[in-house]
Image (cartoon, coloured by chain):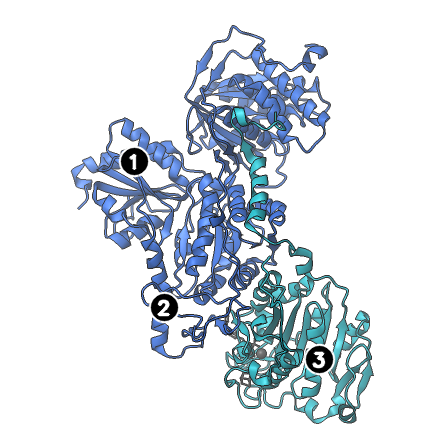
Amino acid sequence: MTHGSECLLRLYEERLELEDYQNGVPRWCNGCGDNAILAAVQRLCRDEGLRPEKTVFVSGIGCSSRFPHYMNTYGFHGIHGRALPIAQGVCLTRPDLKVFVNTGDGDCCSIGAGHWVHAVRYNMNIKLFLHDNQIYGLTKKQASPTSPAGTRSNTTPRGSYLEALNPLTVTLGVQNVSFVAQAADWIPELLYDIVKAAYRHKGFSFVRIIQRCPEFMPNQFDPWMHDPQRTMLLRHAQGITPSEGLARVYRNVREHDPSDLERARAVASCIDPVPVGILYRNEEVPCYEDLRRSTKMRTAAYVKAGLEAEFDKFTIWPEEARTPAAA
Amino acid sequence: MNDTLLLQPETTAASTSKTVTALDEHIVEVLSDSGEGAQRCGQSLGAISARMGNGVWTVEIIPAEIQPPARSVEGASGNRVRIGACGITNGGDESDLAIAFNEQVLLGRLRAGEFKPGATILLESMWRGHSDPKIAASYLQTHQELVKAGYRVYEIPMERECLKLVQDARKGKNMFALGMLCSIYSRDMALAREQIALTFGKKNRSVIEANVKLLDAGFRWAEANLDFKYRIPAARPSVPQIVVNGNTAIALGVLASGMEVCAMYPITPATSASHYLSEVFEKVGGVVHQAEDEIAACAFAIGASYAGRCALTITSGPGFSLKQEGIGLAVMGEIPLVVVNVQRGGPSTGQPTKAEQGDLLSAMFGSHGDAPKVVMAPCSIEDCFYSIITARKIAETFNMVVVVLSDAALATSQQPFPRPQFSETWIAPPPDQGEIPPGARPYDWDEVTGLARRFVPGQPHGMHTLTGLAHDRSSHVAYDPQINQEAIRARSLKLAALAKTLKAPPLYGDPEGDLLVIGWGSTKGAIEEAVGALREQGHKVASMHLRFLQPLPPGIKEAMRRFRQVMTVEGNWCDDPADEIIDENNRRYSALAMLLRARYLVDVDCWSEVKGQPIKPGAIRRALIEKLKASRDPKDAMP
Ligand SMILES: Cc1ncc(C[n+]2csc(CCOP(=O)(O)OP(=O)(O)O)c2C)c(N)n1
Ligand code: SF4
Ligand SMILES: [Mg+2]
């Protein structure tokens, strides 16, 4: 596979600042939760020292999918629902790149739902952030699969009909799941910790971020923002240990061992209080790219040798040149 | 026959009194229930003949179902082999001889008119005395009908003869049949035994020996009991040749092109290319990724291409439809991508195993908006191999999507071609990871050619966000109408730039005359054979075959001017002007004819057939004769 030319020798540690990851002024609405996600991710890039040229953010279509434009890294703003397979193609061929996906609840859980399920199964080293505002933002307020039953929208003026899909339980139900976490855009400290844990996990990290859309879902999450008791902080020595300050505000803390899949599924089903933290992590799940990638340098000679061996299988030799093996 | 005799390989004919008829060519079919090995028998005959230096074209006869009931019309499985004295470029016309393991598998082929009048039929005779009276009666009835219809029918006790050597005649009858065919066509038995050793090479010696015994027995039986024998002269080949079908040739092309990723979702008739590729790609460091659907496969290939090296996705009709949105993205983002569409009968699920050339227009105009992409169509098995190498090169030189339109006919046919000589230029250099110079932008479209340098992730100072939205030279989302105009112009110009590098396609036949036939894709051999036959009768005709459909190569209009009439021959629908309500205002033309009419303002006619079978040279010949006749009639002449 392709190997980007790694810098052989870094003579000095170049420290990058937040500005080095920022690109332009985001065009999200005031108070849009996407801004908080952007801030957390830019901080992550700086703190982890990601090389901007070695980092790729892939997205689909939606307000949230504009994310890559605001990063000073490589970005791929693709088509609705297909960010994951695009990111997988990048990830498979370029082990030297850090690959992220930003996607919305429509992008991931509706049009791209098939890819989402399979992405969990592939478990490629991709960090996915699901910006879940429970509505279609870009297309101006239609119900999404994660809209709670009864949500009034332009396509459901009398309220949506179906129970909301729970992205956490779905993901935790798929074979090969290796990392599932939930964050809320209005608790930036935890959001950062969770994004960082997701980054450090090797495999497919699925982070659902509950994201405010003041434009189309004003006050949707107010009950949770105003009452800290309705947030269930997941704490564990192997997971996230909230700071003292945070623990003073959020007192509804639950010890949760992220290696326990059964418990993770139970916690995931809980909608009120809403769990925040790492639900599940398993470092043992093999990554698809590690199973598939070739470690050989693909020189012309190497390709030629493989090709000639195949030609040999199908060759009819003229009488005098017939190989002894075939005679 | 006694056992000791059977153990000795035989080369001499048991009966020498037969007259041997010399033939220019013959078409043979081997038909059985699936699982009885007729495919292997036919393929082996093809390989042996090719090794003897005959021109050969073999086509698989595939039942549509996986396990069709035994002795059923629709269950016919087998192989059709055209053997000629010199170059054979297509499957030819109706068959001259068939070996059938039961009468039912013959019927479908018979009803489809696949046999010449008076063709020779070698029929397994075991059914005549079958314990089930219905089966025996069916056999007798078919036998009588065949005789009455004038076929030369030979009843052969294949089962009985095979049981002398093996316990289960189902496994082995095909080699007995091969032995018979070797006798009938005076094949070189040393080569035949060698071929068996090659075919069963992976298995142990006893398997090979058992099969060689059956081969010899079949040969001897035919020598002793059949009253005819043919000889098709051959010239021993002087260069090494490759014998593969079109799909394997495509897969070999993928290896040779240096591509690293093939993303696919299984679909007939493209799948066999991916099967073979899955087998071998890893040996050269490549990956076949079976995605969750065609949309994902296309997106995966786009991601891999974007990341540095052109990737490939391979599919057939329905999957091609699903990939259209992704193809548009690659066009917009100017990401190189090779899309192989092994066309099958459509629309919808259509005829999965059958040949059709129905996707030309969707390949050219598919995806919404103005989405210029390159469309190529290989015209032979050999061309399947080279087309992929060319497609990869074009994709990366022009940062474009290249669609390669093969079809089910090429996919399942075999024709020997000279073993390619590897060239390092087939393979792309490793992706550029150097620094992007200051000021350079990801879409610095050249004023004249529309070309822009490709930025690859990992290149310092090249950071930008590729987007499927309209964008300016910096890849910023463009709201300015002028920018959109400029960008569409640039993407369009690339086709013109590519067209400038293409050569005029050669004419086959007369340099000027009464009729020019234009074709594309798998029909080349059949069209040229028909044109050749007409020229022998004194007609002034020629054909031109297009490998590039978009952009079109130069020289087409000039060639058309030198002929009184122009007509395409295609495997996609056109209305018949003779139909009651069809007239010049509502007639739907075949795809290429429509394109040529629109582009060159020439009154191009068309003739087509959509029977799911490769178009036969005889059918084309008749259509051309009709056309020539009609044009002599002044009221039908061109305005
Ligand atoms: C194939 C296709 N169908 C529909 C659309 C229109 N569309 C764009 S974004 C979107 C939904 C976005 O919702 P979500 O993914 O939740 O993102 P948000 O805007 O809420 O961040 C839709 C339906 C499209 N761009 N492409
Ligand atoms: S519409 Fe909603 S999701 Fe979109 S930018 Fe505005 S607040 Fe954010
Ligand atoms: Mg949304």
Q: Is residue B449 left or right of residue A155?
A: left
Element carrying mark 1:
helix
Judge whether A293 appears above or below B139 on screen.
below
* Chain at numbered mark 1: B
Q: Which residue is mark 3?
A: A194
Q: Colour of chain B?
A: blue
Of residue B47 and residue A12, the one placed in the foreground of this image is A12
Judge whether A273 appears above or below B380 on screen.
below
Q: Is residue A139 visible?
A: yes
Q: Is residue B563 left or right of residue B91?
A: left
Q: Residue at x 29, y 35 (%)?
A: B624
* Chain at numbered mark 2: B
**Residue that protrudes farthest toward the front in the picture:** A11
Of residue A125 and residue B454, the one placed in the foreground of this image is B454
Judge whether A10 appears above or below B204 on screen.
below
Give how far across and how far down residue A162 sits, in percent.
Answer: 64, 75
Q: Residues within 10 Å of mark 1 (few under 14, many from 20)?
A: many
Label 2, label 3: how many angstroms apart (C-alpha)? 43 Å
* Residue type at tag 3: Ile
The number of callouts visible is 3
Ligand 3 appears in which quadrant? bottom right
* Chain at numbered mark 3: A
User: In the rendered image, what is the letter of the chain coloured cyan?
Assistant: A
* Residue type at tag 1: Leu
Label 1, label 2: how many angstroms apart (C-alpha)? 41 Å
Give me the disc on residue B488.
2
Q: Which residue is mark 1?
A: B624
Give how far across and how far down residue B524 sits, in percent.
Answer: 38, 39
Q: Nearer the viewer, mark 1 or mark 3?
A: 3
